[in-house]
Image (cartoon, rainbow, N blue to C red):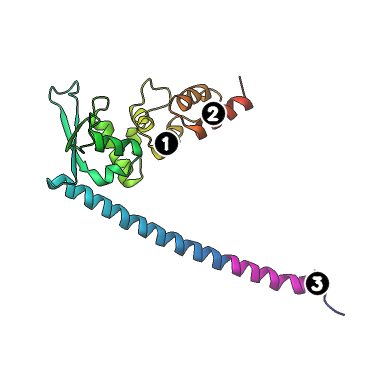
């Protein structure tokens, strides 16, 4: 008698072959992911190197950001950065580098940022160079002020806005009790995905 095409005699080898092919696909995906991670690590090291060089040398590539005095100090604070790196952050930052505090287009070596404090700017810089957002940079959703989120929205840093909301949800879970606050923040800071998530949560359980 001929074995059934759907019997165990014929299905078992096909199943094992399919499993083997999937295992090989997974191995290849892991190898590809590892290579991408190594490329990303090399890129981050290059970015850090450029930034460190700008910090240490008064070259044409250096721009100094000046921030107003904080409550802890009467003196303004200065942060040096690579002009080339900051110019890649967003069109808004590129315009700031070109025009400074006027519209001359003279690419000034110093730029005053009166609406930003130095610590918030440093948090932005850390994120833009590493892709990582430190936990202490993110406020709980119920906080009255979200300086980092405000800066990210003001200067067109959409990746930072998304990462901020993702990190904030780890501190303050999104549920029907917090959805209204999340919706307020998402609308205020133009976070479309976060707005949709909050609206969907309210629609499922409007209270």
Q: Nearer the viewer, mark 2 or mark 3?
A: 2
The reply to whether callout 1 and callout 2 are in contact (CB within 8 Å) is no
Quadrant of res 151 = top left
> Which residue in the structure is indicated by mark 3?
5
Residue 167 marker: 1
With respect to residue 28, does 53 lie above or below?
above
- Closer to the camera, 108 or 72? 108
Q: Residue at x 22, y 47 (%)?
A: 51
Residue 198 marker: 2
Residue occupying the far bottom of the picture: 1
Q: Residue at x 70, y 71 (%)?
A: 14
Q: How dense is the environment of label 3, judged by Cα within 10 Å: few (below 14), some, or many (20 and up)?
A: few
Q: What range is drawn magenta here? A: 5-22
Q: Nearer the viewer, mark 1 or mark 2?
A: 2
Residue 71 in the figure: left or right of residue 153: left
Quadrant of res 153 = top left
Residue occupying the far right of the picture: 1
Looking at marks 3 and 1 on the same chain, the residue that comes earlier in the sequence is marked by: 3
Distance of label 3 from label 1 (alpha carbons)? 53 Å
Residue 131 in the figure: left or right of residue 32: left
Image location (x, y in percent) of residue 59: 14, 47
- Closer to the camera, 102 or 57? 102
Q: Residue at x 19, y 20 (%)?
A: 71
Secondary structure of the residue carrying numbered label 3: loop
* Residue 6 highlighted magenta (yes or no): yes
With respect to residue 16, does 159 lie above or below?
above
* Residue 23 highlighted magenta (yes or no): no
Looking at marks 1 and 2 on the same chain, the residue that comes earlier in the sequence is marked by: 1
Looking at marks 2 and 3 on the same chain, the residue that comes earlier in the sequence is marked by: 3
The reply to whether callout 3 and callout 1 are in contact (CB within 8 Å) is no
The secondary structure making up most of the magenta span is helix
């Amino acid at each position: 008698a001929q074995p059934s095409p759907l019997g165990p005699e014929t299905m078992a080898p096909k199943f094992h072959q399919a499993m083997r092919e999937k295992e090989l696909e997974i191995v290849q995906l892991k190898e590809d992911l590892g290579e991408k991670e190594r490329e990303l690590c090399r890129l981050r090291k290059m970015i850090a190197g450029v930034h460190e060089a700008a910090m240490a040398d008064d070259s044409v590539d250096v721009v100094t950001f000046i921030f107003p005095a904080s409550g802890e100090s009467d003196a303004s604070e200065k942060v040096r950065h690579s002009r080339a790196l900051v110019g890649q952050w967003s069109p808004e930052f590129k315009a700031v580098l070109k025009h400074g505090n006027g519209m001359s287009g003279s690419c000034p070596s110093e730029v005053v940022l009166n609406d930003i404090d130095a610590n918030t700017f440093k948090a932005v810089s850390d994120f833009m160079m590493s892709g990582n957002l430190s936990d202490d940079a993110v406020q709980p959703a119920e906080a009255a002020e979200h300086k980092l989120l405000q800066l990210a929205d003001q200067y067109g840093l959409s990746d930072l806005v998304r990462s901020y909301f993702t990190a904030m949800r780890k501190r303050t879970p999104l549920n029907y009790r917090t959805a209204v606050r999340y919706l307020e923040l998402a609308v205020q800071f133009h976070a479309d995905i976060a707005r949709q998530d909050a609206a969907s949560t309210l629609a499922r359980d409007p209270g």
